[in-house]
Image: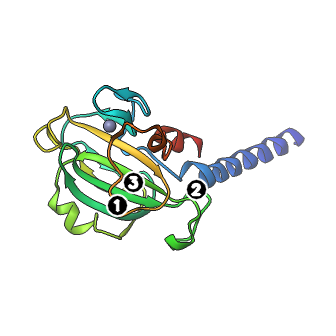
């Protein structure tokens, strides 16, 4: 009888633990592509002629669906030469629960580059300053002709701080001080 009681309390403890760990860690971030790896170009590496890579690249077929990594506000949806359509989402860190961006102490802007223009998404979901949830579809990978001329891939970056209307969300920089303004995206997602 005592063994049975012990088993039951162990089961209760185990399920409580699963619930708590799910509620407080697993739900903060998720990768925009599934599966995420292999990372075909890592964060911070130096590419001759371009500079330090400010994000991580993952090669996938054109039209692969890209999902939002963390809830936040759409701050930028527009095309760029060599970068295709770009979406930038501003989110709070993991411990922030308010939906008021003014209260956020350490916001992060996550950047999705080399997408294709998708009029359905632009018209319905991925609208400027709209609050969107983690896992929402924010776009699809562009073909080579849509993404600036490259093998279809996602460039995923995570910049420290609030969204700035001054465009600083490029994929590369020759300045190491600019590199330090960025997180390694997979470390942000894995650590919290
Ligand atoms: Zn890249």
The residue shown at (59%, 46%) is: 192
- In the figure, 189 relative to 124: above or below? above
Q: Position of residue 55 (x, y in %)?
A: 39, 39
- In the figure, 168 relative to 152: above or below? below
Separation of disc 3 and disc 2 at Cα?
16 Å
Q: Quadrant of the N terminus?
A: top right
The residue shown at (74%, 49%) is: 12
Q: Nearer the viewer, residue 32 or 176?
A: 176
**Total tally of numbered discs in the picture:** 3
Ligand 1: does it lie within 8 Å of the C-beta at label 2? no
Q: Is residue 35 visible?
A: no
- The circle on residue 166 is 1
Q: Is residue 94 left or right of residue 184?
A: right
Mark 1 or 3: the one toward you: 1
Give the residue at mark 3. 135
Separation of disc 1 and disc 2 at Cα?
25 Å
Q: Position of residue 95 (x, y in %)?
A: 62, 59
SS at mark 3? loop
Taking the image as four quarters, which one is ligand 1 found in?
top left
The residue shown at (50%, 57%) is: 161
Give the residue at mark 2. 94
N-terminal label among 1 and 3: 3
Mark 1 or 2: the one toward you: 1
């Amino acid at each position: 009888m005592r063994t049975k009681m012990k088993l039951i309390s162990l089961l209760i403890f185990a399920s409580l633990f699963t619930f708590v760990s799910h509620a407080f860690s697993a739900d903060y971030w998720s990768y925009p592509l599934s599966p995420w790896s292999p990372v075909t170009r890592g964060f911070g590496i130096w590419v001759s002629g371009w500079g330090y890579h400010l994000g991580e690249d993952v090669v996938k077929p054109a039209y692969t669906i890209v999902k939002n990594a963390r809830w936040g506000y759409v701050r930028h949806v527009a095309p760029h030469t060599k970068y295709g359509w770009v979406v930038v989402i501003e989110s709070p860190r993991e411990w922030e629960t308010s939906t008021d961006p003014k209260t956020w102490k350490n916001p992060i802007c996550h950047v999705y580059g080399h997408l294709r223009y998708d009029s359905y998404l632009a018209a319905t979901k991925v609208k400027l300053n709209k609050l969107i949830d983690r896992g929402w579809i924010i776009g699809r990978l562009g073909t080579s002709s849509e993404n600036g001329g490259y093998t279809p891939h996602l460039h995923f970056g995570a910049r420290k701080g609030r969204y700035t209307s001054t465009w600083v969300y490029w994929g590369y920089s020759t300045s190491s001080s600019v590199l330090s303004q960025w997180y390694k995206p997979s470390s942000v997602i894995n650590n919290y």
